[in-house]
Image (cartoon, rainbow, N blue to C red):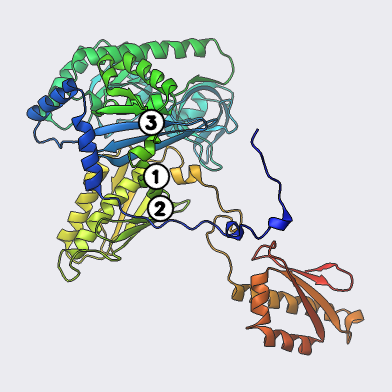
């Protein structure tokens, strides 16, 4: 048991600096060239087989950028962290803490508790603290997704009839209160809102997504090569899929042979078979399927993106990753390595320095400017400041260059912080439409790497760039921080001048009401005010004459008592004779 020292009044002034909040470190730009050089050195130390495979890929596709991707996994007793590095630069960062459960992707057997026709939604009991929110549109067969090109209809006749026949008006009949329903969480509970769900179940594999209740089969539109799309269409028509089920080929399936899709489908069908067994053997709300933990989920999702190395500092997680990789891609086991050095793994690869910027309000840019990120409940505002930008300030491309740097870093910070909802970027004004288009294209190119659904609008005449990004879970900032208990999350408190005015206004109000009583006519009143020392300092100095006038005008005697333990926005007026509080 660690030795815990009790508070000693004799040592009260020994560490006075601990009374003040810690100073936020000023963000320092980390030179990407330095990170790239270190990554290049690590890439040169890969096994010769991996280097040869990489060289062959470069010959087959010389236009593709030469990148070195690493997944760095840090496991601690209370927290697991995963970082994705591209040429040494942090591109994605995820945290999972002990005792926290990620709900997105989980499948439940629930019971409709009530229907709200005004909201057009059902509230479903799923055995969790908060009921799930299920919109009527999410209870109908899924409409065609614009991001998917549908190639094959594997629906049964009954499914086709339902999709044509039913509308949202039929929901109260189809799903009355008390009926059982199988749902999947698409958006985690945020704040006071319960999780959002859908009846259109989707199980993600490495190369495909299985949709047990939809017969639509298609290919992700992110696969752009026409010849590759034609090849995948032929594969999709050849795969034997159970009637009534649908399959979507993910972007990770690009270039893969038939056997990869067949194996993936087999694993997903086995998983769905276990889910069906639980559905049939349970008569109450129950969890049917939970997405794997952060480490296994990250390996599943990112092993598909040509990750060159996975480095883990925990033997337990190393074994778990090897087991997962053996199931989905046995040939990739050589990419997984156990970290043995004494330097903490995130410090060894300069990840801690990059993470520091993730939680700073101000983020420096390569050219000397900065972006300022403010996250509110409704939207995220990103302001672009030129600061001491290194470009020639009288050059015509100076503003464009600063804005391009800003939107690229903004896109990266949006991914790292997991920001979602409505996002506004206030760029530096540009008169030329061609310049605005160049900045907009830079943002779109950078956001193309983002796995979350997003949409951007061109820069307006006011220099405002609007975008939305799918919000599935709370942002990393919200997950790590809590609203300030002192200012209650406002970020500001009233200044001494404002408090002085409020105190004087309260005193005059109390005095007038006391004077209205007959027993107080002509008698000197004695009042005491309890307040914070900074507010008392204002009253003693700048406002001392005002208080003296008040005492003379109203025949009142005022006394003050200050205590640093009082909240700076709080005060109390007492009757000095009785000690009663006056309002």
How far across and how far down the image is residue 352, in percent? Answer: 39, 43
Q: Nearer the viewer, mark 1 or mark 3?
A: 3
Nearest to N terminus: mark 2 or mark 1:
2
Q: In the shown orientation, is residue 564 left or right of residue 142?
A: right
Q: Which residue is mark 1?
A: 417
* 74 or 117, nearer to the observer: 74
* 121 or 417, nearer to the observer: 417
Q: Residue at x 67, y 70 (%)?
A: 533
How far across and how far down the image is residue 298, in percent? Answer: 36, 28
- Around disc 3, counting alpha carbons within 10 Å, would you say few (fewer than 14), some (14 to 19), or many (20 or more)? many
Q: Secondary structure at mark 3?
A: strand
**CA distance separating discs 2 and 3:** 29 Å
Labels 2 and 1 touching (C-beta < 8 A)? no
Residue 319 visible within the image: yes
How far across and how far down the image is residue 426, in percent? Answer: 32, 60
Q: Secondary structure at mark 1?
A: helix
Q: Residue at x 74, y 79 (%)?
A: 508
Nearest to N terminus: mark 1 or mark 3:
3
**Image position of 365 with respect to 343: above or below:** below
Q: Secondary structure at mark 2?
A: strand
Nearest to N terminus: mark 2 or mark 3:
3
Residue 73: give its label: 3
Q: Which residue is mark 2?
A: 380
Q: In the shown orientation, is residue 578 left or right of residue 364?
A: right
**CA distance separating discs 1 and 3:** 18 Å
**CA distance separating discs 2 and 1:** 11 Å
Residue 397: give its label: none
Quadrant for the N terminus, please: top right
Q: Residue at x 48, y 29 (%)?
A: 171
**Image position of 332 with respect to 367: above or below:** above
Can you name the residue that lies furthest to the right here? 519
How far across and how far down the image is residue 557, in percent? Answer: 81, 82
């Amino acid at each position: 048991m660690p030795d815990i020292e009790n508070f000693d009044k004799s040592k009260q002034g020994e560490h006075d600096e601990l009374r003040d909040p810690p100073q936020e470190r000023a963000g320092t730009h980390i030179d990407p060239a330095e990170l790239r050089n270190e990554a290049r050195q690590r890439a040169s130390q890969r096994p010769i087989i991996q280097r040869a495979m990489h060289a062959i890929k470069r010959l087959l596709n010389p236009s593709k950028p030469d990148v070195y991707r690493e997944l760095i996994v840090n496991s601690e007793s209370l927290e697991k962290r995963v970082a994705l590095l591209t040429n040494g630069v942090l591109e994605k960062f995820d945290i999972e803490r002990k005792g926290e459960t990620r709900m997105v992707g989980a499948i439940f057997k629930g019971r409709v508790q009530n229907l709200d026709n005004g909201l057009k939604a059902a509230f479903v009991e799923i055995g969790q603290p908060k009921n799930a929110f299920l919109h009527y549109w999410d209870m109908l067969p899924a409409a065609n997704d614009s991001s998917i090109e549908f190639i094959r209809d594997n629906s049964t006749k009954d499914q086709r009839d339902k999709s044509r026949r039913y509308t949202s008006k039929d929901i109260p009949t189809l799903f009355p209160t008390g009926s059982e329903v199988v749902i999947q969480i698409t958006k985690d509970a945020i704040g006071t809102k319960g999780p959002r769900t859908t009846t259109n179940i989707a199980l993600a594999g490495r190369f495909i997504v299985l949709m047990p209740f939809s017969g639509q089969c298609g290919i992700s539109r992110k696969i752009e090569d026409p010849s590759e799309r034609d090849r995948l269409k032929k594969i999709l028509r050849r795969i034997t899929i159970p009637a009534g089920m649908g399959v979507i080929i993910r972007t990770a399936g690009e270039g893969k042979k038939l056997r990869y899709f067949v194996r993936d489908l087999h694993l997903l069908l086995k998983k769905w078979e276990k889910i069906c067994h639980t559905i049939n053997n349970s008569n109450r709300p129950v969890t049917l399927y939970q997405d794997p933990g952060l480490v296994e989920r990250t390996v599943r999702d990112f092993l598909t993106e040509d990750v060159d190395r996975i480095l883990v500092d925990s033997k337990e997680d190393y074994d778990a990753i090897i087991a997962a990789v053996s199931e989905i891609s046995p040939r990739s086991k050589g990419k997984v390595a156990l970290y043995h050095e004494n330097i903490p793994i995130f410090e060894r690869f300069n990840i801690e320095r990059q993470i520091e910027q993730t939680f700073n309000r101000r983020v420096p840019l390569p050219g000397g400017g900065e972006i300022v990120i403010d996250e509110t409940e409704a939207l995220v505002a990103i302001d672009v400041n030129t600061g001491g930008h290194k470009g020639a300030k009288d050059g015509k491309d100076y503003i464009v260059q600063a804005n391009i740097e800003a939107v690229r870093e903004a896109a990266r910070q949006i991914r790292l912080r997991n920001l979602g909802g409505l996002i506004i970027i206030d760029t530096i004004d540009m008169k030329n439409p061609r310049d605005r288009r160049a900045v907009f294209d830079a943002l779109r190119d950078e956001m193309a790497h983002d796995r979350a659904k997003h949409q951007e609008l061109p820069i307006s005449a006011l220099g405002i760039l609007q975008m939305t990004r799918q919000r599935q879970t709370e942002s990393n900032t919200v997950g790590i921080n809590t609203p300030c208990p002192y200012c209650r999350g406002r970020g500001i408190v009233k200044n001494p001048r404002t408090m002085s005015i409020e105190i004087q206004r309260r005193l005059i109000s109390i005095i007038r009401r006391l004077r209205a009583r007959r027993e107080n006519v002509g008698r000197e009143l004695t009042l005491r005010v309890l307040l914070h020392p900074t507010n008392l300092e204002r009253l003693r100095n700048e406002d001392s004459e005002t208080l003296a006038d008040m005492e003379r005008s109203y025949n009142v005697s005022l006394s003050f008592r200050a205590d640093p333990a009082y909240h700076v926005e709080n005060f109390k007026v007492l009757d000095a004779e009785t000690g009663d509080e006056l309002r």
